[in-house]
């Protein structure tokens, strides 16, 4: 039992790997097995790669009929059928693995995919854990690592404790490795100065629907300071997302210098959409939400302590927080908006709550305000 638990943890929590920029993978997964009418007859399973059922940049041919035909021809498995399918999203700044649970005949099959991207291909650690009975007894059914070149489909087979054969097929539907590839990631405290800001246009449909809220975007500014790429992090509605992206693409900053040389830089930007006459006061009591360009000057900063366990497991990434400061500039409330790991979240919260800012003054009076704060954890 102890060995099984250790293997399960290894499947879900693997050591992170060095990447030059955030990577986004959209994974299409199908799960095949004996249908109810077959009685779940035992069979034989192996594993291999299928080439290429997917045409890159075109509509994919990842259909149940195509995959079943390959299964029946290559694996000699005439009785299998499609049992489940799902779309999985993996981001390098988030959890190390993505999982999918399939329930069949009183058993749970936990499928665990751990991507290890590299140029032109993705290494995958693939695991399947069977859980059954009231005590949820666990058994490792599949534990392997494969190399999946771009444009190919991986298909693997395994047998459960009752000697029934199952198969999984998956492919990477889309990859986003170019975003910020050569950029230096910085937190809000060291973000370059905004020199050109275009206000977003409040979409008419969003106004009619009374939509408002905060859109958080990741932006990449080029060596000349002009925004060259953007992507959303969080948003209350797609209409507001698109309006924010269109505006930020026209922004420009002072060039970001590293040892005197301009560098591409990546950071988060917050755009607030608020309808006139709608009370924006939240539970924290903050009456004014600031965009990044309005954020008050940080006068006291406490660096976060890198959690020992996070460093040991090579967990890194950016934590995005919302902070509320009072009229004296002290942080009074914090909440997490985005984080790759709860250990990093807590470390960021512990540090930021000790930060102090210059009071935000409007119309000659200090105000209680809210804004976003980013804390980046990077292993050296």
Image (cartoon, helix red, strand yellow):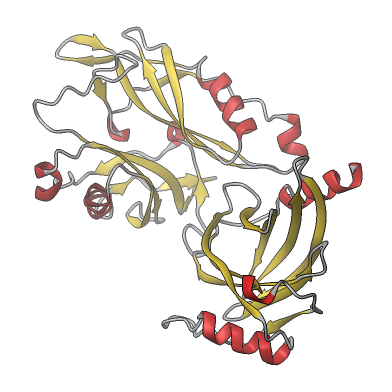
Q: Quadrant of residue 99?
A: bottom right
Question: Can residue 29 be seen at all in this image of the molecule?
Answer: no
Is residue 216 positioned above or below 69 on the image? above
217 or 379, nearer to the observer: 217
The one nearer the camera, 166 or 25, is 166
Q: Residue 347 or 282: which is nearer the viewer?
A: 282
Residue in view at x 43 percent, y 14 percent = 331
Point out the image quarter for the N terminus: top right
Residue 161 place in picture, x, y as percent: 83, 61
Q: Answer above or below: position of 265 versus 32.
A: above
Residue at horizontal 25%, vertical 10%? Answer: 366
- Quadrant of the image occupied by residue 342: top right
184 or 306, which lies in front? 306
Q: Residue furthest bottom?
A: 73
Q: Is residue 75 visible?
A: yes
Q: Is residue 265 left or right of residue 274?
A: right
User: Residue 251: where, in percent of width, then height?
Assistant: 26, 49
């Amino acid at each position: 039992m102890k060995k099984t638990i250790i293997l399960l943890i290894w499947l879900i929590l693997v050591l992170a790997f060095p990447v030059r920029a955030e990577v986004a993978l959209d994974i299409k997964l199908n799960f095949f097995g004996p249908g109810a009418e077959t009685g779940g007859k035992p069979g034989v399973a192996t594993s291999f790669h299928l080439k290429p059922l997917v045409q890159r940049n075109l509509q994919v041919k990842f259909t149940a009929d195509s995959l079943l035909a390959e299964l029946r021809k290559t694996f000699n498995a005439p009785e299998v059928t499609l049992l489940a399918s799902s779309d999985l999203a993996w981001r390098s700044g988030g959890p190390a693995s993505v999982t999918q649970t399939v329930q069949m005949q009183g058993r749970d099959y936990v499928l665990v995919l751990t991507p290890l991207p590299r140029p032109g291909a993705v290494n995958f650690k693939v695991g399947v854990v069977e859980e059954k009975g009231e005590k949820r007894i666990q058994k490792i059914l599949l534990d392997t690592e494969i190399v999946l070149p771009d444009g190919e489909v991986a298909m693997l087979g395994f047998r459960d404790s009752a000697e029934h054969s199952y198969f999984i097929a998956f492919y990477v539907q889309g990859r986003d490795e170019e975003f910020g590839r050569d950029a230096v990631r910085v937190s809000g405290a060291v973000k370059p100065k905004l020199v050109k800001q275009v206000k977003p246009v409040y979409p008419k449909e969003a106004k009619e629907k009374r939509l408002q809220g905060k859109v958080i975007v990741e932006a990449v500014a080029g060596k000349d300071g002009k925004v060259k790429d953007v992507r959303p992090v969080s948003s209350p509605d797609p209409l507001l997302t698109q309006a924010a992206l269109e505006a930020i693409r026209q922004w420009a900053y002072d060039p970001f210098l590293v040892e005197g040389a301009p560098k591409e830089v990546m950071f988060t930007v917050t755009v607030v959409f608020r309808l006139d006459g709608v009370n924006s006061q939240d539970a924290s009591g903050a009456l004014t939400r600031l965009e990044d360009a309005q954020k008050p000057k940080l006068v006291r900063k406490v660096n976060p302590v890198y959690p020992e366990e996070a460093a040991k497991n090579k967990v890194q990434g950016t934590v995005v927080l919302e902070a509320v400061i009072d009229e004296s500039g002290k942080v009074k409330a914090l909440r997490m908006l985005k984080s790759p790991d709860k250990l990093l979240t807590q470390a960021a919260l512990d540090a930021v709550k000790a930060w102090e800012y210059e009071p935000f003054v409007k119309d000659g009076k200090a105000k209680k305000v809210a804004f976003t704060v980013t804390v980046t954890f990077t292993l050296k």
